[in-house]
Image (cartoon, grey):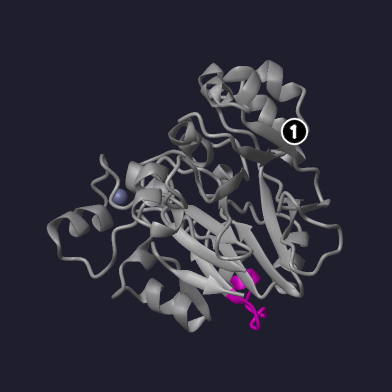
Amino acid sequence: MRVKILGSAAGGGFPQWNCACSNCSRLRKGVLKTRPRTQAQVAVSPDHSTWFLLNASPDLRQQLGENSEFAPPGAARGTPISAIILTSADVDCVLGLLHLREFQPLRIYSTLSVRRVLAEENSLFRTLTRSNPPVRWEVLSLDRLVPLVAHAQPGARENLFCKAVSLGGSFPDYVSDQLRRSLPEDEAVIGLQFMQRDKRFLYAPSLPGRGEDWKRRVGESQLAFLDATFWSDDELIKIQSGGPSARQMGHLPLYGTGGLLHQLQLVRNVRRVLIHINNTNPILDEESPQHRAVLEAGFEIAYDGMEFEL
Ligand SMILES: [Zn+2]
């Protein structure tokens, strides 16, 4: 299985167009040792020719253009992208679907709740149904193994499988109260567990960090991409002089008691890659003590173009 990071930042990217935080300002001035980053986007391939997009970022058009793997494979119109798998209905996870609207038949995997949010309340996404055949929605039921290749044979060793695991988040603010009341909350934010033969890859770009189950999922993977939106719980409060904490936004902070580093301090034999990094996060500064601390704790910091082979 090949895993490629096309974008590694949280919503807004790095730098964010309207942000004057220390990181964004210093990056614009060229005085920060770091890399610019586009918004979180990952692609997985079971065979180096078929690709599954994990979410569809607002930067998707740019990200597909900059990576030659995603060019049409033949002389006719076409794509090596077989399907898109959504972890939530957050704007940052779904806006890129509109970049894929050019009459291309595709499949979209999501929980039934995420599909209802997009299909019932957001008529703009009906542009995806104009292709022939129209986009096909596939339901991801929690904790059920789904084969991802169209011709997959149940049990065949080379197949790529995906399992949706609930991470305990909530639906985006834009969902109406009426629809929200009819949706099971455990379908709001999921992690994706990919399996091919004996290899396991976990994608959890939005991790509230509640309960113990998510840590077990990390421990049984060879590779785990984990939510690194914020370094501290009050990061945005300090910058914006108010607003919600990281935990209130559904993101377990990296630092502090009960933070991601603390909770995973005993998990060592898994490649743990920090992704979905907000532009305010001090780990983006390669000369900061926070950057050094996560590397010393055995974590890797995602950047655009990073690749893995499992
Ligand atoms: Zn910023």
**Residue 180 % position (x, y):** 70, 24
SS label for mark 1: helix
| Rendered position, 165 above or below 34 | above
**Residue 278 % position (x, y):** 41, 53
Q: Nearer the viewer, residue 117 or 305?
A: 305
**Quadrant where the image shows the N terminus:** bottom right
Q: Is residue 264 magenta?
A: yes
Q: Which residue is drawn at 73% across and 38% down?
A: 138
Residue on which disc 1 sits: 112
| Rendered position, 97 above or below 75 | above
- Asked where in the image residue 31 lies, by quadrant, the reply is bottom left
Q: Which residue is drawn at 57% across and 72% down?
A: 272
Q: Is residue 247 visible?
A: no
Give, as a three-letter code, the residue at label 1: Leu
Residue most extreme to the right = 155
Q: Residue at x 55, y 37 (%)?
A: 90
**Residue 264 % position (x, y):** 64, 73
Q: Is residue 192 visible?
A: yes
Q: Is 72 left, or right, of 183 in this rendering? A: left
Q: What range of the chain is rendered magenta? A: 262-271
Q: Residue at x 66, y 44 (%)?
A: 189
**Quadrant where the image shows the C terminus:** bottom right
Q: Nearer the viewer, residue 216 or 195?
A: 195
